[in-house]
Image: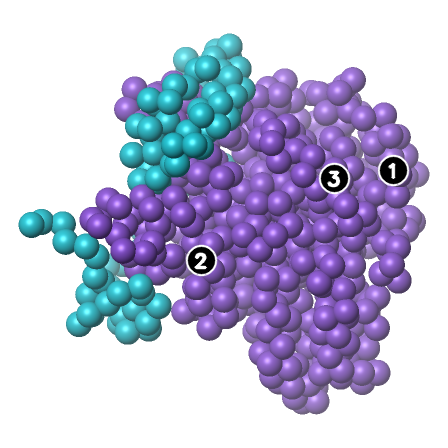
Chain colours: A purple, B cyan
């Protein structure tokens, strides 16, 4: 039962092969069986799930036919869930029970999804390995000595191990796509503004975007259909019509123009990863696509731009955590300054502190022009590069990550090396365009992912291309050993 | 190192984050490394380029000046570390 996609679960529920309550119980048992090893979940909401499943079964009995009614999912612990612990994997919010639901959570609840719990992540979404979590690292189901990627590591690992059919995640610099690649699942970062950020605890406001992690592009389309849409409660939400992502999945790829950015395919790209990506691109040409080389001349500046912009924005966003209104407060503060400094000093992890300090520096008097303003100008150059290539091609293809999943602890003492694992994903966030990572191979029994990158609001085309690829290949169906 | 211990101490005050004495060197070293990475931006010519704050260059959407929220103070304060009569309590600011 646990090896079913959302589409298969929904079909089974509609045909009454099983009830939502039954399938919810099946996944809850599986989580209990495996999650102690993997540590994907911060909270498991069993009572809540069974109540939601009962409700879904009633809706199904009345004849409702929505594709998500009764389907079990889980949310990254960055989304506020009413009366349920919402920690952002930080000691700062270890005692926080959200008083409201994020828009994404409301949408999934209305669609009839059954939330099984909240998923582990890097603290405040800052990280690429799920090692900065206050609740300990998540283990990659493909090799438990290795990281699942981050920051949506719990989401990717849980879907990969079939503990849930689908999860929500967030992507600020690659945090959906890179763990999707490391865990052999499909992960989509929508266009900036496509999915509401209301109730999604903010890291970098001009970069953050919520999206689905699933096993198939079809499932990602079903999830996105429920998650996308204009929301007046998010002032950066874009009022753009929502496409039909599901009925267009089977469109032919004949004539699709795919660009390969030469800067992503230089000598730095690992030869094994290159081989997997080349084989995938070959499949696309067999499906009728035309491939050509393109150039994104400023792309190599993505990482420095990101570490100024994201750090600056996070230093502003995390200033709300001050020990006054919610979250952690230090013991016996002797004055207000001490309350602020010690609450924050004691409750934030090292990576979060590093980035807040970096952001504070970049925005401080005398440095604002040299760092933040400069980075925003280079951001526009990077964005322009994408605008120009999309005049010539429909989508881009590129590797998702420079390596397969690395061992736990391998990069914790070298922040820069950790930052460079986002080298292929970051530019997409800076430009605000959508991208999907799909599994395209394995090296030493660890998954390899490839990204398809599109212009603003081209999620329909990306999912169509990904689905067609998945119709002629089976990388997305492979299970990690021990989880069959 | 591009960032001194003094700089780190200044930033920790601005950011209201206490950094332990034993950790300051480590932060100075890590932050200097990040700044070295960021210095690559200086080689790029950007004098005529407009800064980009929003990927779609959107501006703040406005709405009518009418009340849309309801008072949920009790709910929100139910998790506060210390409240009294609807007020959040903190150590005295003015003696």
Image position, residue B28 (x, y; %): 44, 24
* Dot 3 or dot 2, earlier in sequence: 2
Residue at which label 2 appears: A93
Question: In which quadrant of the rendered view does residue A369 lie?
Answer: top left
* Dot 2 or dot 1, earlier in sequence: 2
Can residue A136 be seen here? The reply is: yes
Q: Look at the numbered discs 1 and 3 and tell me whether their residues touch, using CB distance below 8 Å.
A: no
| Foreground disc of the pair 1, 3 | 3
**In the rendered view, does A422 fall on the left or right side of B21?**
right
Kindly identify which numbered label has been placed on residue A407: 3
Q: Quarter holding the N terminus of chain A?
A: bottom right
Q: What is the C-alpha distance between the residues marked 3 and 2?
A: 28 Å
Image position, residue A377 (x, y; %): 45, 23
**In the rendered view, does A199 fall on the left or right side of A64?**
left
Q: What is the C-alpha distance between the residues marked 1 and 3?
A: 14 Å
Residue ranking furthest to the front:
B22
Q: Indicate the chain on which mark 1 is placed.
A: A
Instruction: In this rendered view, identify the residue nearer to me: A296 or B81.
Output: B81
- SS under mark 2: helix
Image position, residue B2 (x, y; %): 44, 15
Can residue A192 be seen here? The reply is: no
Question: In which quadrant of the rendered view does residue A278 lie?
Answer: top right
Q: Which residue is found at the position 79% from the left and 53% from the top?
A: A141
Q: What is the C-alpha distance between the residues marked 2 and 1?
A: 38 Å
- SS under mark 3: loop
Q: Quarter holding the C terminus of chain A?
A: bottom right
Residue at which label 1 appears: A443
Q: Look at the numbered discs 2 and 1 and tell me whether their residues touch, using CB distance below 8 Å.
A: no
* Dot 1 or dot 3, earlier in sequence: 3
Question: In which quadrant of the rendered view does residue A270 lie?
Answer: top right
**In the rendered view, does A300 fall on the left or right side of A484?**
left
| Foreground disc of the pair 2, 1 | 2
């Amino acid at each position: 039962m646990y090896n079913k996609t959302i589409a298969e679960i929904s079909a089974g529920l509609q045909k009454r092969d099983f009830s939502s309550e039954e399938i919810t119980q099946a996944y809850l048992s599986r989580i209990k069986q495996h999650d102690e090893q993997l540590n994907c979940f911060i909270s498991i909401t069993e009572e809540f799930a069974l109540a939601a499943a009962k409700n879904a079964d009633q809706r199904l009995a009345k004849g409702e036919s929505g594709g998500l009614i009764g389907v079990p999912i889980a949310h990254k612990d960055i989304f506020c869930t009413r009366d349920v612990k919402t920690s952002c994997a930080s000691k700062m919010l270890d005692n926080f029970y959200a008083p409201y639901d994020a828009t994404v959570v409301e949408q999934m609840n209305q669609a009839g999804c059954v939330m099984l719990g909240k998923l582990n992540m890097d603290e405040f979404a800052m990280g690429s390995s799920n090692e900065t979590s206050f609740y300990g690292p998540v283990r990659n189901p493909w090799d438990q000595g290795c990281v699942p990627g981050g920051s949506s590591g719990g989401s990717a690992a849980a879907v990969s191990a079939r503990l849930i059919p689908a999860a929500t995640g967030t992507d600020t610099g690659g945090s959906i796509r890179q763990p999707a690649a490391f865990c052999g699942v499909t992960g989509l970062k929508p266009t900036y503004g496509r999915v509401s950020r209301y109730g999604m605890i903010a890291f970098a406001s001009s970069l953050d975007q919520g999206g689905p992690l699933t096993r198939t592009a079809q499932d990602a389309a079903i999830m996105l259909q429920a998650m996308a849409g204009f929301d007046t409660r998010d002032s950066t939400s874009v009022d753009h019509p929502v496409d039909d992502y599901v009925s267009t999945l089977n469109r032919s790829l004949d004539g699709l123009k795919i660009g390969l950015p030469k800067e992503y395919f230089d000598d730095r790209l690992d030869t094994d990863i290159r081989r997997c990506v080349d084989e995938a691109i070959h499949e696309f040409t067999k499906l009728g696509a035309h491939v050509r080389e393109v150039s994104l001349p400023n792309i190599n500046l993505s990482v420095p731009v990101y570490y100024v912009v994201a750090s600056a924005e996070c230093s502003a966003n995390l200033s709300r955590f001050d020990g006054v209104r919610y979250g952690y407060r230090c013991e016996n503060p002797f004055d207000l300054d001490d309350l602020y400094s010690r609450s924050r000093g004691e409750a934030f992890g090292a990576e979060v502190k590093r980035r807040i300090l970096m952001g504070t520096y970049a925005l401080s008097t005398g440095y604002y022009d040299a760092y933040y303003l400069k980075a925003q100008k280079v951001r526009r150059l990077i964005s322009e590069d994408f605008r120009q290539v999309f005049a010539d091609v429909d989508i881009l293809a590129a590797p998702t990550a420079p390596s397969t999943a690395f061992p736990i602890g391998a990069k914790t003492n070298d922040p820069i090396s950790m930052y460079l694992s986002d080298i292929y994903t970051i530019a997409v966030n800076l430009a605000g365009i959508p991208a999907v990572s799909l599994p395209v191979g394995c090296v030493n029994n660890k998954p390899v992912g490839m990204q398809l990158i599109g212009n603003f609001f081209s999620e329909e085309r990306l999912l169509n291309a990904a689905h067609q690829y998945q119709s002629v290949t089976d990388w997305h169906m492979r299970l990690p050993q021990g989880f069959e | 190192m591009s960032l001194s211990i003094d700089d780190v101490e200044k930033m920790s005050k601005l950011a209201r984050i206490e950094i332990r004495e034993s950790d300051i060197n480590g932060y100075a070293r890590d932050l200097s490394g990040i700044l070295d990475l960021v210095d690559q931006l200086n080689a790029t010519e950007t004098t005529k380029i407009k800064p980009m704050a929003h990927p779609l260059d959107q501006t703040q959407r406005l709405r009518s000046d009418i009340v849309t929220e309801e008072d949920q103070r009790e709910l929100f304060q139910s998790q506060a570390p210390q409240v009294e009569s609807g007020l959040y309590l903190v150590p005295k600011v003015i003696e």
